[in-house]
């Protein structure tokens, strides 16, 4: 019998979070899950009510437009101007998405193919590398090192003139690194100099604890070369709703849309109506969520420090990127925590070779569960000292 799978699937490893789901399913007991970044906080009731009102409109029960409703694109453009002081044309520089994940994948397919080179952060959300490989292009890995605050060292990116695309993600999943304006200015300048394009996955911009992260599109000249992705998933606890948007260079948006038009439709229009409400009135919900995640972050860091596992304090995202005790590999450590203590984390190696030696905690459990996880992990952590800081 012929192999039913396309050969391109051989280019990518199994999907990390599917593997974690399998590990969970094989584990008995009360599991405390810090694995997948899926908010446990409910979607705010006024957003749900906006959705319920929209459901009564029969026009929303038909096929949506590919690039999204005009009112949704207008709301996204207005939100970007309020939040980042970036002016966008909602007709050509904004596209509504079934979550940022599908938009990133479709943009990669619309922009690159065999022979093209794509710069990808390492470690990072695995979709960047996997979609690059599925499109037949070559990933060029950009190491994210603790000594640099997990910011790409652009001087180390090889063969910039041969790049077609550079993928960034700040604030960063999984490292929680936050890019500066100076970094974005250098990235845009290099894109102009070496004739490549830049994408920033900015879905965590509203999950910050100290200073507000900025947008790549605030840099002059960025609209000529750049696209940025945003999502309502984490900001408003709407992961299952599948709603996000892309903004930026109209030609790159057009390339993404060409793939979408031959693959899917736009988001359900009632969900877009709810997104309009969230973008116009949702800052109070975002602030409330930040307060919860800030408390959880502090609870986890204090607990880890108390049991002898000092960890870098994240400035944004709802992740804690924790350097492992010396000599531990991330997958082995993950299996050990789950088997012995029913605590699930994400192994860093699953997010790229430079993720080895780290695990990721998602702050998606209440403080009482965080305290219980600390109690369970104490014996394992005390078995070895934390690794020395990277020089």
Image (cartoon, rainbow, N blue to C red):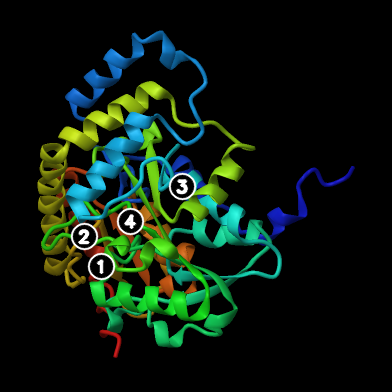
- In the image, 127 versus 86, the foreground residue is 86
Mark count:
4
> Which label is found at residue 202?
4
Tell me residue 284's x, y (percent).
10, 38
Tell me residue 118's x, y (percent).
56, 69
Q: Residue at 41% x, 67% y: name it.
A: 330
- In the image, 130 versus 22, the foreground residue is 130
- In the image, 43 versus 276, the foreground residue is 276
Q: Earlier in the sequence, mark 1 or mark 4?
A: 1
Q: Earlier in the sequence, mark 1 or mark 2?
A: 1
Q: Which residue position holds label 2?
A: 316
Q: Quadrant of the N terminus?
A: top right
Q: Label 1, label 2: how many angstroms apart (C-alpha)?
A: 7 Å
Q: Label 3, label 4: how many angstroms apart (C-alpha)?
A: 12 Å
Q: Which residue position holds label 3?
A: 101
Dot 1: element: loop
Tell me residue 334's x, y (percent).
40, 60
Q: Are marks 1 and 2 in contact (CB under 8 Å)?
A: yes
């Amino acid at each position: 019998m012929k192999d039913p799978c396309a050969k391109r699937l051989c280019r990518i490893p199994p999907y990390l979070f599917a593997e974690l789901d399998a590990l969970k399913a094989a584990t008995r007991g009360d599991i405390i899950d810090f694995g997948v970044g899926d908010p446990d906080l409910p979607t705010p009731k006024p957003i749900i009510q906006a959705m319920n009102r929209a459901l009564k409109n029969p026009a929303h029960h038909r096929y949506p437009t590919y690039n999204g409703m005009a009112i949704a694109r207008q709301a996204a453009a207005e939100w970007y101007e309020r939040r980042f002081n970036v002016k966008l044309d909602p007709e050509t520089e904004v596209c509504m998405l079934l979550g940022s994940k599908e938009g990133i994948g479709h943009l990669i397919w619309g922009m690159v193919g065999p022979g093209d080179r794509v710069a990808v952060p390492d470690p990072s959300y695995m979709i960047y590398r996997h979609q690059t490989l599925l499109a037949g292009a070559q990933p060029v890995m950009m190491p994210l090192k603790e000594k640099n605050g997990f910011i790409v060292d652009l001087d180390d990116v090889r063969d910039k003139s041969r790049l077609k695309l550079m993928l960034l993600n700040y604030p960063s999943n999984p490292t929680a690194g936050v890019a500066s304006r100076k970094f974005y200015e250098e990235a845009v300048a290099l894109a102009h100099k070496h004739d490549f394009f830049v994408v920033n996955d900015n879905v965590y911009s509203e999950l910050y604890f100290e200073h507000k992260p900025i947008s790549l599109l605030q840099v002059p000249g960025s609209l000529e070369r750049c696209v940025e992705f945003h999502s309502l998933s984490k900001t408003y606890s709407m992961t299952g709703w599948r709603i996000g948007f892309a903004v930026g260079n109209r030609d790159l948006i057009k390339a993404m849309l060409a793939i979408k038009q031959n693959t899917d439709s736009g988001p359900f229009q009632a969900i877009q109506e709810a997104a309009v409400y969230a973008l116009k009135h949702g800052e109070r919900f975002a602030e409330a969520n930040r307060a919860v995640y800030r408390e959880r972050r502090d609870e986890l860091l204090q607990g880890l420090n108390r049991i002898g596992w000092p960890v870098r304090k994240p400035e944004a995202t709802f992740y804690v990127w924790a350097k492992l005790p010396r000599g531990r590999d991330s997958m082995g450590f993950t299996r050990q925590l789950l088997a012995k203590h029913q605590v699930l984390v994400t192994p860093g190696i699953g997010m790229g070779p430079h993720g080895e030696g780290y695990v990721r905690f998602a702050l998606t459990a209440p403080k009482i569960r965080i305290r219980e996880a600390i109690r369970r992990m104490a014996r394992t952590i005390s078995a070895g000292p934390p690794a020395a800081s990277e020089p």
